Image (cartoon, rainbow, N blue to C red):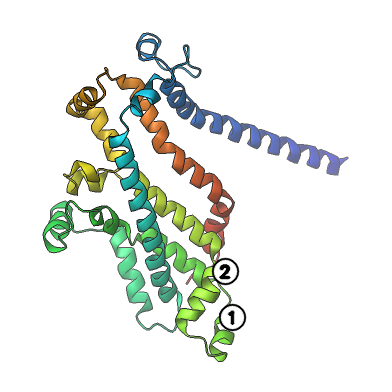
Amino acid sequence: MTSLDNKTRTKLIHMVILFVIGVVCILWLIPLIMILSASFTEESTLINTGYQILPPKFSLEAYRWLWNDPSILLNAYGVSIIVTLVGTVCSVLIMSLLAFALSRKELKLRNVLTFIVFFTMLFNGGLVPYYINMSRVLGVKDTLWALILPYLVIPFNVLLLRTYFAGLPKDLFDAARVDGASEWRIFFRIVVPLSTPALATVGLFTMLQYWNDMYQALLFIENQHLYPLQYTLYKLLVNTQMLNELTVQTGAPVPHLSVTMAMAVIAIAPVTLCFLLAQKYFVRGITLGSIKGD
């Protein structure tokens, strides 16, 4: 009887936990659903009734207006895609190489370099030196490199990968060395295949960082043709001059609220798809590397 009561109590606790998690998930989804609904609602209806979960009057006005002259949107989309793809690939490669070196006990300066990486998580030189370094020293202002370089090495991701790599079986590396494998061969033939969950997780983090970033464009990009998608959305929200320019090009009044929501949906869609594809690696990539560290 006691065992049955314990099983019933455990099952009840699990049901309560699942119910609470479900409610929290629904609460988190409601704003996204309202954004999607607003993007399919007529501008006049949106102004009169406000945001609702279901569109009172379904309309494709916002999307039709966006694609009437899609040059600005497509250009911003192209910039974001290029920056995200190039930045994510280069960043994951550089961070994984650095993390692999830091995970090797044979490296004499291992602890010092790890401290330097950790130190940058706590302190930085400030905005003015950063701006001078990017614009005058590196000379990347008004180029795509200004959007790519700042996130090539993210200290948290480096430490996450370092901890994961440190937990890989050392015997595999020793056996590979006996067979004459170089460090590069060990990394690409052994470490990378065994670290798919961690690399996928870090890749997702990095991709989100690049895709959602607006700050670097705000600091370094003046050429309108180099605006990423998030910065274009920001300009659309706060800059009436861009709206007036779009109105002149299309010859039709801009449904401001519904177009803004439609652009938000377009900006969110690729991120959501990538998250769903990488979801199976997400939890494993974080938890497996957190067990062992030195």
Check the image and report above or below for 282 versus 152.
above
Residue pushed farthest right? Answer: 1
Residue 215, x across and y down, in percent: 25, 45
The answer to which image quadrant residue 245 occupies is top left
Residue 184, x across and y down, in percent: 45, 79
Check the image and report above or below for 293 versus 259.
below
Which sits in the foreground, 268 or 215? 268
Classify 10 Å Cα crowding around label 2: few (below 14), some (14-19), many (20 and above). some
What amino acid is at disc 2? Answer: Leu
Q: Residue at x 18, y 51 (%)?
A: 142
Identify the mark nearer the N-term, 1 or 2: 1
The answer to which image quadrant residue 49 occupies is top left
Tag 1 near tag 2, CB within 8 Å: yes
Helix, strand or loop at mark 1: helix
What amino acid is at disc 1? Answer: Leu
Measure the C-alpha gap from mark 1 to mark 2.
11 Å
Horizontal side, residue 115 vs residue 219: left or right: right
Q: Residue at x 59, y 86 (%)?
A: 175
Checking the image for residue 194, the label placed there is 2
| Residue denoted by label 1 | 172
Helix, strand or loop at mark 2: helix
Q: Residue at x 27, y 52 (%)?
A: 147
Classify 10 Å Cα crowding around label 1: few (below 14), some (14-19), many (20 and above). few
**On-image quarter of the N terminus:** top right
Horizontal side, residue 280 vs residue 9: left or right: left
Which sits in the foreground, 236 or 214? 236
Which sits in the foreground, 113 or 78? 78
Residue 292, x across and y down, in percent: 54, 68
Checking the image for residue 81, the label placed there is none
